Image: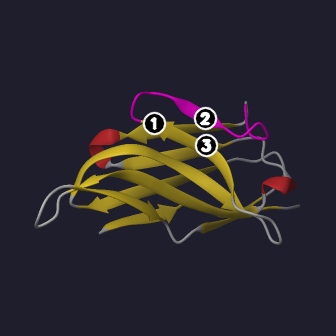
Amino acid sequence: QVQLVESGGGLVQPGGSLRLSCAASGSILSIYAMGWYRQAPGKQRELVAINHSDGTINYADSVKGRFTISRDNAKNTVYLQMNSLKPEDTAVYYCTAEGRIATIRAPADFGSWGQGTQVTVSS
């Protein structure tokens, strides 16, 4: 089992900044990708940004130039720096990770989601 614990959400005014963090714990051997999705009320969950182990990074068009994703591989942690926040960025942000874990039998792939952290952009 892999647990993802998110932190850093909150209420911020338009134009402000927030930094989200997500730490993965468990019998992790390697992480292929870590990233962030978000879900606004009445909308489907959408990709915000994802960081792959080969260095590839993908962003949603709506956040390019404003959000920056980074990883600390030694800590199995991913960050999302969000600048120039807009009201339309308001959503629950979910951390996700895919990789390989050690089990009693043999290594196995995993895919996990965090519980989500609320980000509200409002004046």
Q: Nearer the viewer, residue 59 or 103?
A: 103
- Which SS class for mark 1? strand
Main SS type for the magenta part?
A: loop
Rendered residue at 18%/55% (across/down): 107
In this rendering, would 64 be left or right of 100?
Answer: right
Instruction: Identify the mark at residue 49; answer none if there is no mark.
Output: 3
| Labels 2 & 1 near each other (Cβ < 8 A) | yes
Mark with earlier residue (2, 3): 3
State the residue lying farthest toward the left: 104
Magenta-highlighted residues = 53-64
- Examine the image and state in which quarter residue 90 appears: bottom right
Mark with earlier residue (2, 1): 1
Mark 1 surroundings: few (<14), some (14-19) or many (≥20) residues within 10 A: some
Q: CA distance from mark 2 to mark 1?
A: 9 Å
Crowdedness near tag 2: few (<14), some (14–19) or many (≥20) residues, C-alpha within 10 Å: some
* CA gap, disc 3 and disc 1: 10 Å
Q: Position of residue 18 (x, y in %)?
A: 65, 51
Q: Amino acid at mark 2?
A: Asn
Q: Could you tell me the amino acid type at mark 3?
A: Ala
- From the top left corner, tell me how far across and down residue 92 is, in percent: 67, 66
Please, what is the three-letter code of the amino acid marked with disc 1?
A: His
Q: Give the x, y percent position of residue 28.
A: 24, 55
Residue under the image location 39 percent in, 57 percent down: 23
**Quadrant location, the C terminus:** bottom right
Report the front residue among 103 and 119. 103
> Which residue is disc 1 drawn over?
52
Quadrant (top left/top right/bottom left/bottom right) for the N terminus: bottom left
Compared across the picture, whether 61 is left or right of 113 comes to: right
**Residue for badge 2:** 58
Q: How many marks?
A: 3
